[in-house]
Amino acid sequence: MELSILLFCISLIFCWFFIKLIFNFKSSMKLPPGPAGLPIIGSILELGSRPNRSLAELSKIHGPLMTLKLGSITTIIASSPESAKEILQKHDKTFSARTVPDAVESQPNREATLAWVPPDNMWRNERRICNTQMFTNQRLDSVQELRHQMAERLVNHIRKQCESGSAVDVGRVAFATTLNLMSRTIFSIDMVDQEFEKAQEFKDLVWRIMEGTGKPNLSDYFPVLKWLDLQGVRRRTRPAYLRLHEIFEEQIGKRLEDRRNSGMNKEEMDFLDVLLDQCEDERSGFGRNTIKPLIVDLFIAGSDTSAATTEWAMAELLRNPQELNKVRQEIIEQIGIERPVKESDINKLPYLQAVVKETLRLHPAVPLLLPRKALNNTEIFGYTVPKDSQVLVNAWAIGRDSKSWVRPLEFLPERFIESSVDYKGRDFEYIPFGAGRRICPGMPLAIRLVNLMLASIIQPFNWKLPKGMTPENLDMEEQFGVTLRKAIPLVAVPS
């Protein structure tokens, strides 16, 4: 114990001298303004448990492009559409690399991920395969019946809860639905059973990763102290990664055995077959161990973000019953209740689409987007963003900017009716999926899925809050991770 304390003190002293050295070098640069911070730790304490909110408040004092010293790491935060455009469009190539949190480093073969590697050849190959084999409109159209089946199963599950008089954990059933959709798309199997009983393990694994990755972590701010893992983030996150790798390795092993024994039917190929075909080409860079991090990225992003958005949308509608009535009335008028909602119906439901857009404005799935890294010294608005600094874009703050939005804190879907503002990365006052070359590749699937799930659960049911709870006292607090989820899960009663 005494040796550990001594080593820790030596490390802190070394770190302090290291910070002073960097500070003296960078003091000649004109950095964006920001809080002075404390010796050694800088502004770490100002982040709090919800950095999206803390950084938004600090930007009101120091401006839309702001510098924070977080330990030994210089961090630049963009909190306005103009500063986001500079980073995500004008200087997109310069800021296309990532700073990688220690929690992400804890997973096997991190260099083969899609989300966290620089845009090298491996990244381009992964992105190309995802775009052409999963996320093109043609491919999404060809498997829309699968999404209809998942939506029907979701409705049937809620109907059973309704008949028994039970309340529904909206986030859990939405997560189970999105998880099964991803597993059917990639592996052609359901990861969770008809009653969604096994969904909780996956939900817990995914959230442990999301929370660990997004949580302020001393190992990220003082890289020389990584080996100590002072907050235990790596120790908590790595087992979740290993468990997901174990689950996916089992599926890969079964598929390889099936391919050896029975051959492969080209008409029944799923995404795993596409990846395994790549593995057979030595020039592709793909292998059995390198496709698992990609699958982990797809499962995490595909299941967690869409489920969280669906839960936030239902929470906002239950908090605003008149808006919920408008959505349901639109669905009944345009489609009726005799048949389920189909994806082809969504274009007839502009108010539903506006609800989803407004939800993404107030509750972007990734509030700070994923961190970027400056490859060179870059001038923005007369300030220098130094090479190797971490760059964060606060999409949460941008979506609530009063300069861009009227009554920005209110849930007003009407603002998107007949509005040309969209989430595709061209309107920088509204970037829930990011923008530029690293815009979320799964955006086309996410939008289709959230619209379909939301319409499917609103059409056949009247929803209300549990007895004793009113719209006014519905808890809307956030729990921060890479994604932003409801701190208290939404439970509602269908009838």
Image (tube, grey):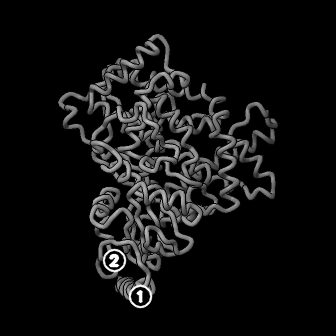
Front residue of this view, candidates 97 and 487: 97
Location of residue 18 (image quadrant): bottom left
Q: Position of residue 229 (x, y in %)?
A: 43, 71
Task: Residue 392 in the image: state x and y as whole percent.
Answer: 44, 62
In percent of width and height, residue 319 lies at 26, 33
In the image, which disc is placed on residue 41?
2
The amino acid beneath tag 2 is Ile
Of labels 2 and 1, earlier in sequence is 1
Nearest to viewer (mark 2 / mark 1): 1
Question: Which of 372 and 386 lies nearest the eye of the viewer?
Answer: 386
Amino acid type at mark 1? Asn
Quarter of the figure with the C terminus? top left
Residue visible at 50% across and 36% down? 447
Measuring 51% from the left and 47% from the top, which residue is drawn there? Answer: 426
Label 1 element class:
helix
Does residue 469 sit above or below 242 in this rendering? Answer: above
What residue did someone put label 1 on?
24
* Secondary element at tag 2: loop
Q: Nearer the viewer, residue 299 or 200?
A: 299
The Cα–Cα distance between marks 2 and 1, rounded to whole angstroms, is 16 Å
In the image, residue 387 sits, relative to residue 200, either above or below, namely: below
Any part of residue 7 in sight? no
Q: Is residue 417 left or right of residue 259?
A: left
355 to the left or right of 320: right
> Can see residue 297?
yes
In the displayed image of the protein, which residue is found farthest to the front?
Answer: 382
Q: On the picture, is 146 further left or further right than 328?
A: right
Q: Is residue 139 above or below residue 14?
A: above
Local packing at callout 1 (Cα closer than 10 Å; few below 14, some 14-19, many 20+) is few
